[in-house]
Amino acid sequence: MEEKERELQRRLPLALKELYAVNGLEDWFSRESRDRIEPLARLTVENREYWEEEMGLTFRGIPAHLQANEGIPFFIECQGCWWWWVLLTGDDDPPVIVECLEENVQILACERLSDFIFACAWDFSLMDRPFFVQGEYGREIEFLIWLRNNWEERPGTRLSSSVHRYRFGKKDRRLLLWDETGQFFLSADTKSSGEEALRQINPFVK
């Protein structure tokens, strides 16, 4: 990482350095997901002038204290529809923004890089557990209120101004909600625990 910092002539955020220090990182992403993380050797610094003038992208809804004029593209959706950047704000755990091509904007995906990585690992692990089920849900506002009162909310992320990913956990149970499609993904360490969770959320499940 020191060599990369010299090449880029930038101090890289601690959270980013810790991410790329993980042994077998690129192999893990390629094995667990079709999305991919940029190899360390290909990391580059882009600036806001490039985003606006060359890519036609502008910031939308990003709080002023989380903005920066430079960032590093480090994560790509499997079909190249979305790119994610870590902003070089000077913080050790800086925010992550995502490109929304249909809106020609960059929005805040989450406030901390560590939360973004947690969310990726959380999502990828769901189907590898002993109990896994997916389905559809409704009454989203009521469902979210109920979950926030009864489960522990985990880091959420966004894909566009109106597309959210909500995550909740309780004991060994993990729940992921895709609000744009009304889908839920539920996993647990045992069948009995998973079935109990399904009974709990049944009023909101279609």
Image (tube, rainbow, N blue to C red):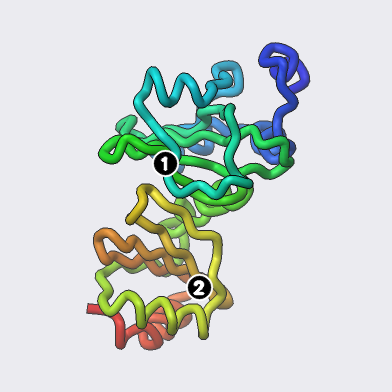
* Residue labelled with disc 1: 33
Above or below, 158 relative to 146: above
Please tell me whether mark 1 sits on a helix, a strand or a loop. loop
Which of the pair 42/129 is nearer the observer? 42
Q: In the drawing, does residue 32 fall left or right of residue 78?
A: right
Residues packed near mark 1 inside 10 Å, few (<14), some (14 to 19) or many (20 plus): some
Image disc number at residue 173 = 2
Which of the pair 183/188 is nearer the observer? 183
In the rendering, at what x and y percent does residue 117 appear? 57, 47
| Residue 158 in view in this figure | yes
Which of the pair 134/131 is nearer the observer? 134
| Residue 35 in view in this figure | no
Q: Quadrant of the C terminus?
A: bottom left
Q: Earlier in the sequence, mark 1 or mark 2?
A: 1
Q: CA distance from mark 1 to mark 2?
A: 21 Å
Q: Quadrant of the N terminus?
A: top right
Which residue type does callout 2 highlight?
Arg
Q: In the drawing, does residue 70 fall left or right of residue 80?
A: right
Above or below, 170 relative to 84: below
In the rendering, at what x and y percent does residue 4 appear? 69, 17
Q: In the drawing, does residue 90 fall left or right of residue 148?
A: right
Quadrant in the rendering for residue 31: top left
Please tell me whether mark 2 sits on a helix, a strand or a loop. strand
Residues packed near mark 2 inside 10 Å, few (<14), some (14 to 19) or many (20 plus): many
